[in-house]
Amino acid sequence: MDGLLLVDKPVGWTSHDVVAKLRGILKMKQIGHAGTLDPFATGLLVIGIGKGTKALTALVGVDKEYEATIRLGATSDTFDRDGVITELDSRLRGNDKPSLIDIEKALDKFRGGYEQLAPLHSAKKIGGKKLYDLARKGKATEEMRPKKHVTIHELQTTTYEWPNLSIHVKCGSGTYIRSLADDIGRELGVGGYCAELRRTKVGSFDVTGAITLPLDQTAVSEALLKL
C-alpha cells in the first residue's frame, strides 16, 4: 500500500496513536504523519503510507486552517483545557467583559502575523531537552519559550458569547493555536485558553474528505489517495 490517507483524528488520541493503529492494521512500519495534533484537538491528520511517506515532506511548510474556541476569563498552564486551569475575575482587574468591538481590536494585533512564543508545554528543545519535560519537572521558565514569527492569513470571529469566543484561523506552518489563544486572552486583559480545537485543512487537503476511526484494512484501502 502506497499513498496518502486523510484521517479525522478523534479527541483523546495522539497523532502517534493513529500511526500505531494503522501499523497494526496494515502490518507495516513505513507509516508517518504530517503535522502533529494535540490529544485534545480533533481534525485532519495527513498520513503517509509506504512510498507516501516521502510525499509528506512537501506538506511541511503548507498553510493550515483551524476552528477554535477560546475560553476567556481563565488561564491554563498548557494553554489548553488539559492543563491546570486558573479562573480569573475580570472585575478585579478593572476590566469589563470584552465587547465584540474589543475583540476585533484585539484580533487586529495578530492579523497578518506576529512574534509568537511557543508554549512551555511543547516539544521544542532547549539544551537538547524537550520543553514539556522541563515544564513537568518545574524547571521551565517563561524566558525559555522560543520565539518565532508566524503568519496569520485569516483570523475571524465566528461566534461570541461570554466566556466562549470561537474563531476561524488560517495560518502559516509552525503556528501554535494554543499560544494564539493565550495571547488573545492577554491582549483582552481577561486571560484565555484553547478549549476546543479542530484542524480543517492542511494545504489543499480538507477534513471533509477524511475517514474516521475505527479503521480496518478495507476502509484504508478504499480511502487511500494513490500517488
Image (tube, helix red, strand yellow):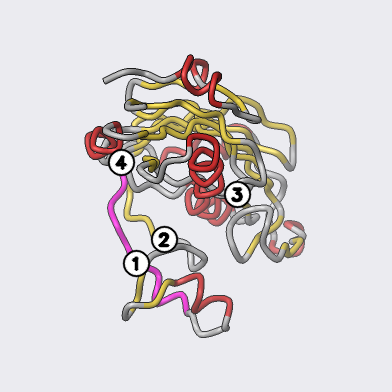
Q: Tell me which label, 2 or 4, sits earlier in the chain.
A: 2
**Which residue is under mark 4?**
151
Whole-number angstrom distance, CA of label 1 to CA of label 2: 6 Å
Numbered disc in front, either 2 or 3: 3
Whole-number angstrom distance, CA of label 2 to CA of label 4: 14 Å
Question: Can you tell which mark lies on residue 146?
Answer: 1
Please name the amino acid that badge 2 sits on: Ala
Question: Badge 1: few (under 14), some or many (20 or more) residues near its Cα, within 10 Å?
Answer: some
Looking at the picture, tell me which residue is in the foreground, 92 or 178.
178
**Which residue is under mark 3?**
39
Please name the amino acid that badge 4 sits on: Thr
Indicate the quadrant containing the C terminus: top left, top right, bottom left or bottom right.
top left
Residue 32 visible within the image: yes
User: Where 206 sits versus 106, above or below?
Assistant: above
In this picture, residue 140 sits left or right of residue 99: left
Which span is picked out in magenta? 141-150
Q: Tell me which label, 1 or 4, sits earlier in the chain.
A: 1
Question: Can you tell which mark lies on residue 118?
Answer: 2
Whole-number angstrom distance, CA of label 3 to CA of label 1: 22 Å
Looking at the picture, tell me which residue is in the foreground, 105 or 24.
24
User: Where 32 sits versus 190, above or below?
Assistant: above
